Amino acid sequence: MGKLIVIIMLLMVTACDNQTNTFNVNGSVFEIPNKFLVQGDIFFLPPSQHSYPIVKLYPEMDRLHYIGFIIKPMRGLCSSLDGKGYNMLPNACASVAQGVKKTHHIDLKGLVKTYPYENNLNWLYQIQRVDGTEDVISCGTIGRNNTCSSFGIYHDMIYTVRYLEEDIPNLNKIHQDVYDRLTEWEK
C-alpha cells in the first residue's frame, strides 16, 4: 500500500511539471512549462510587466543564482526611447528594425568594464567598434550580488536576460539557450 501511495505521488508531481501556460507576445504564441515560469512579484519589475512571461532559463539552478529573461514586443520597448542613457536598447531596436532575427555572437574577449555613472554601484561592459563604443552589458549591485542584464533578439521581439556578473563568460551560450527555448516553446 505504501509503495502505491509513493507511485501516485510521483505521478502527480510529474503531471504538475508537465503543465504549461500559454502567452501571446506580439502575435507569437508560446506554450511555456510551469517549471520555467517565475511565480509572484519580481522586485525589479513594475506590475505592468507581468503580462509577459518571466522565465527561468535553467529551473534547476539555485533560487539566488538563477538566470531569467522576459520577452516583449519591439513596438512597446522601442517607442519609449528618449535617446538618453546607454545604447543597449536602441541598438537592439535598430537591429530588429533592420530585420535581424537573432542576437549576434558577442566577442567577450573585447569587453571593457567602464564606470560611466557617478557611483560605483552601476557599470557597463562595452565593446570598441570602428564606428564607436557599443554598450553590451549593464550591471549593478543588488544586495550582495552583482547582477547584469543584456538584450537579445528573437525574430521581431526583444528579450532582456538577467544573470550574475560571474556568468558573463557564458553569455553567448545563455543567448543561444534563450533562443532555443523560445523556438521550442513557440507554437
Image (cartoon, rainbow, N blue to C red):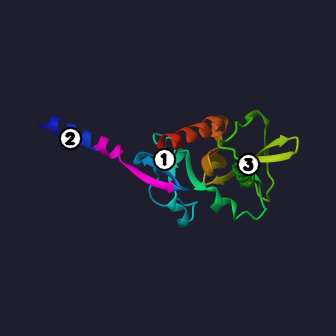
Dot 2 alpha-carbon crowd within 10 angstroms: few under 14, some 14 to 19, many 20 or more: few
CA gap, disc 1 and disc 2: 28 Å
Residue underneath mark 2:
8
Determine the residue positioned at 70% across, 39% down.
Answer: 104
Mark 1 touches mark 3? (CB < 8 Å): no
Q: Nearer the viewer's eye, disc 3 or disc 2?
A: 3
Q: Quadrant of residue 75?
A: bottom right
Residue 117 lies, in percent from the top left, at 79, 57
> Disc 2 residue type?
Ile
Residue at horizontal 65 percent and vertical 41 percent from the top: 102
Nearest the viewer among 48 and 72 is 72
Query: Which of the marked residues, 3 or 2, is nearer the chain's N terminus?
Result: 2
Residue 109 part of the magenta segment: no
Query: Residue 107: horizontal and vertical position, in percent?
Result: 75, 35
Quadrant occupied by the N terminus: top left
Q: Position of residue 150 (x, y in %)?
A: 67, 48
Q: Give the range drawn in magenta.
A: 13-24
Q: Is mark 1 on a helix, strand or loop?
A: helix
Q: Residue flagged by tag 3: what amino acid is it?
A: Gln
Residue marked by disc 1: 63
Q: Which residue lies furthest to the left in this view?
A: 1
The amino acid pointed to by label 1 is Arg
Residue drawn at 88 percent across, 41 percent down: 130
* Mark closer to the chain start, 1 or 3: 1
Q: Is residue 176 left or right of residue 81?
A: left
Q: Residue at x 84, y 41 (%)?
A: 128
Viewer-nearest of discs 1 and 2: 2
**Residue 98's mark?**
3
Q: If you read the primary sequence from the N terminus, does the residue marked by circle 1 or circle 2 appear first?
A: 2
